Image (tube, rainbow, N blue to C red):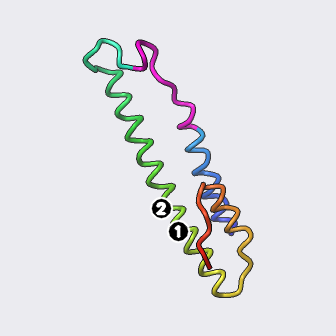
């Protein structure tokens, strides 16, 4: 369980750091210069990073649901794994 809590803390820190990314200054968040350049490249990199973090979070939610189902089948307490799943934004499986 301690390892899972550490992974959860790491993923939440990554998502919190991503939330601090701000829109570039300019007209309505569009890249300056009209055609792209460095700002457009940075925006694409940030979008790509966000997509990777979202995919990772979805995988963690799926894995956490599997952990809960397995613990339930074995008669173990599921309070902590369910709490971790909810922290990730997921709902526990119907058991």
Q: Is residue 23 above or below residue 26?
A: below
Q: Residue at x 38, y 29 (%)?
A: 43
Which segment is the magenta one? 17-29
Q: Which residue is mark 1?
A: 63
Q: Image quarter for residue 40?
A: top left
Q: Is residue 70 above or below residue 28?
A: below
Task: Answer left or right for 81 relative to 57.
Answer: right
Q: Are marks 2 and 1 in contact (CB under 8 Å)?
A: yes
Q: Residues within 10 Å of mark 1 (few under 14, many from 20)?
A: few
Q: Return the x and y of residue 41 as percentages of the image width and height.
A: 32, 28
- Looking at the magenta stretch, what is its main secondary structure? loop
Q: Of 89 and 21, which appears nearest the observer? A: 89
- Is residue 8 shown in magenta? no
Q: Is residue 19 above or below residue 64?
A: above
Q: Residue at x 57, y 31 (%)?
A: 20
Q: Is residue 51 above or below residue 25?
A: below
Q: Residue at x 49, y 58 (%)?
A: 58
Q: Return the x and y of residue 95 as percentages of the image width and height.
A: 62, 79
Q: Please give the count of numbered marks on the rendered protein.
A: 2
Task: Answer left or right for 10 relative to 31.
Answer: right
- Is residue 18 shown in magenta? yes
Local secondary structure at mark 2: helix
**Mark 2 → mark 1, Cα distance in angstroms:** 6 Å
Q: Which mark is residue 80?
A: none
Q: Quadrant of the N terminus?
A: bottom right
Q: Return the x and y of residue 61 as percentages of the image width and height.
A: 54, 62
Q: Residue at x 36, y 21 (%)?
A: 39
Q: Image quarter for residue 2?
A: bottom right
Q: Residues within 10 Å of mark 2 (few under 14, many from 20)?
A: few
Q: Which residue is mark 2?
A: 59
**View extreme (bottom): residue:** 74
């Amino acid at each position: 369980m301690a390892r899972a809590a550490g992974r959860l803390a790491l993923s939440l820190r990554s998502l919190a750091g991503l939330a601090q990314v701000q829109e570039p200054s300019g007209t309505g968040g569009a890249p300056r210069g009209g055609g792209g350049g460095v700002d457009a490249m940075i925006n694409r990199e940030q979008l790509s990073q966000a997509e990777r973090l979202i995919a990772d979070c979805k995988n963690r939610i799926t894995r956490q649901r599997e952990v809960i189902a397995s613990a339930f089948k074995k008669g173990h307490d599921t309070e902590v794994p369910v709490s971790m799943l909810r922290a990730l934004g997921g709902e526990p499986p119907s058991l």
